[in-house]
Amino acid sequence: MNRAILIVYRPAAGRYAAQFRSMVAAATELGVTTVVLLPTGQPAAEAAGLPCHQADLDDPAAVRAAVRRIIAAHPVQRIFPLFEGDVLTAAQCRREHGIPGLDPEQALAFRDKNVMHRRATELGVPVARSCRPDTVGAVAEFAAEVGWPVVIKPYAGWACGDTHRVDSADELARVWPLVADARHDYRVEEYVRGVEYHVDSLLRDGEVVFDQLSRYTYSILEFRDEPGGTVSRKHDLTPAERRILAANSAVLRGFGMRTGVAHVEFFLREDGEVVFGEAAARAGGGSIVPAIQAGRGINLAGEWCRLELDPGHVPAAVLGPEVGTEYLCSDRYGRITAITGAEELRALDSVLDADVWKSVGDVLAPPTASNDVLGWYVCAGRDFDDVRARFKVIRDAFEVRTEPAGEPSCG
């Protein structure tokens, strides 16, 4: 093999294992060597037999130094980051070594919410009104202008981490001390009321060659209160849903993506206006990738690899029924004494796939991010409402029992 790819892989985030394996399989099929860059001290069983290197992935200078060493030893032609936090550093490495793919200017449009919203506005795609939280007074004035609630979020965050929905002046007084010292890392947005969607896409040479529109069954900001679900929209799209797909294409082209994978979120207001939310230059998080694999027959990460390495590749996606996926959650906190397993979930009617990340002995605490969950499942149904009804049946079958952490289990 005289070609190589570099995958930046964080094995501690187990949800990326299937993406990693699919990408390695795609490269191998095409006769390309896979080189892996892992976090320091975190070997990955699925990377056994592959050339592996380590670095502090949270230190861009250390990553760039490691990539220089890797490229000196391997003919790397592409760099693939699987995790949101590695997208910009990977782009810096591409620029440094003349490797095709997103460069830092383009990557910032997918990482920095200030940049992405400004760029979407330039493209004519509506966005939420926003302001900088320079002072608590500035936030209060903004809320008086757009109305409560408002959302305070990191401009480079993901999975709703450190994101706060603020419903009143009293709530702002409580939240402000949590963000005040790092206020320059945050932005404030109006709370957009409407139905939330996401589009997961593959591009080649600036053209969308695959897209899947899906509708959330909940408000992402309410992840502490409701299970996180999403259902595909393949059949009988409304005019508004078709406008979302058109806006998605405009955003991806305008942000400069040529060949790659993207996850983009939109809101649909009651008056029919499509509002851009956020965009990421990676495969969708959580269980979106396995849901698309179950419903469309392709793995987004593996297809990204094939599109980069094979100019003639066309994703062989199927249509099939509507498919939904929902996170597995529990409001029982403490040490797990019993939990329904993945095999038991897969045995349920309409369930296509499932994974449970927690097991007996693990300690459950209240979630701090939208992907801080116990696992997921994928099921099929006739339409959005049918899939959502099946969610409840499956959710009711998932059982978790706990005891206070620190107390021994009795028998």
Image: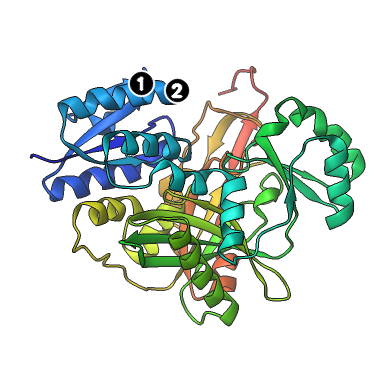
Q: Which amino acid is tagged 1?
A: Ala
Q: Position of residue 360 (x, y in %)?
A: 51, 30
For residue 379, above or below residue 332: below
* Colouring of the image: rainbow
Image disc number at residue 29: none
Q: Position of residue 212 (x, y in %)?
A: 44, 66
Q: Which amino acid is tagged 2?
A: Asp
Q: Position of residue 381 (x, y in %)?
A: 49, 71
Element at label 1: strand
Q: Residue at x 53, y 26 (%)?
A: 361
* Within-10-Å neighbours for mark 2: few <14, some 14–19, many 20+: few
391 lies left or right of 348:
right
Determine contact: label 1, label 2, CB under 8 Å: yes
Name the quadrant containing residue 95.
top left
Image disc number at residue 55: 1
* Quarter of the figure with the N terminus: top left
The residue pinned by badge 2 equals 59
Q: Residue at x 64, y 17 (%)?
A: 406
For residue 310, above or below residue 342: below
| Residue situated in front as seen by the camera: 405 or 12 | 12
Q: Residue at x 89, y 52 (%)?
A: 144
